[in-house]
Each structure stands twice: as structure tokens, then as C-alpha cells.
Amino acid sequence: MITEIIFLTILLEIITSLGRIFFGSMKEKYNKAKYKIRIHHGYIGLIFILIYFLNSENLFLILGISLFLSDFFHHFLILPLWIKRTEFP
């Protein structure tokens, strides 16, 4: 299970970083549109982890931990190295 989590976390981070390269930061678009809530994929990961405790299906745990770790690494490791700030929340 740990191998799947690591692989999926790296894959999700690559997709997130490529999205940022090709589409830029979404922060300005959210501010212009006056949205009150920004949904990070880490939040969705936490929901999947909660579903795992209700359902005991390993897929939810793998997806949940991978989404959460990808968001965590993106905001607290990748972005500070890349643009010198976390952009969270």
C-alpha cells in the first residue's frame, strides 16, 4: 500500500505542477471572481480518508493520503522553492 501511495502522490504532484506551468496560479482568478472558498485537493483527500473509516475500502485510504500529501508537499515544499511563498490558503 505504501508503494501505491508514494507513486500516486508523485503523479498527482507532477500533474499539479504541470497545471501551474501551463495555466499559472489560480489564486488571481479566484480573487477576480470573488469566490469565498478555494478547494484544495488536500481537503478532498481528507474526505476520502473519512470515507475509508466508514467503508474500510483501501482505495479510499490510498487516494485520500495521496491527495493530502500531494497538496501538503505542493504548498509547503514545492511552492516555497519555486515562487518563495506557500499560497495557502
Image: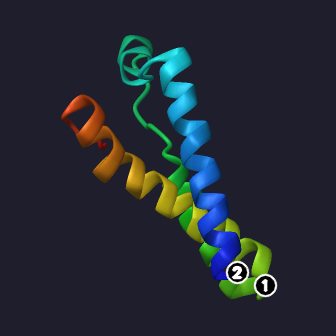
Task: Give the amino acid type for the residue marked by disc 1 in the picture.
Answer: Asn
Residue at 44%, 14% in the rendered image: 33
Residue at the disc numbered 1: 55
Crowding near the residue tagged with mark 2, few <14, some 14–19, many ≥20 C-alpha atoms within 10 Å: some
| x 45%, y 37%: residue | 38
Residue 51 to residue 66: above or below: below
Q: Position of residue 54 (x, y in %)?
A: 72, 85
**Image side of residue 53 versus residue 18, left or right:** right
Residue 86 shows in the view: no
> Tags 1 and 2 in contact by the CB under 8 Å rule?
yes
- Which of 18/64 is in front? 18
Which residue is depicted at the point 57% across and 27% down? 19
Q: Which residue is mark 2?
A: 52
- Closer to us: 20 or 34: 20
x 59%, y 68%: residue: 6
Residue 45: horizontal and vertical position, in percent?
Answer: 58, 62
Query: What sort of colour scheme is used for the picture?
Result: rainbow
**What's under tag 2, amino acid-wise?**
Tyr
| Quadrant location of the N terminus in the rendered image | bottom right
The furthest residue to the left: 84
Compared with residue 4, is residue 19 higher up or lower down, i.e. above or below? above
In the image, residue 15 lies at what x, y percent?
62, 38
Secondary structure of the residue carrying numbered label 1 = helix
The Cα atoms of the two marked residues, 1 and 2, are separated by 5 Å
Between 56 and 71, the one lying in front of the other is 71
Tell me if residue 89 comes above or below residue 3 in the rendering: above
Q: How many marks?
A: 2
Q: Residues within 10 Å of mark 1 (few under 14, many from 20)?
A: few
Q: Is residue 17 left or right of residue 27?
A: right
The image shows residue 83, relative to residue 15, as above or below, that is: above
- Which quarter of the rendered picture does the C terminus lie within? top left
Q: Position of residue 14 (x, y in %)?
A: 57, 42
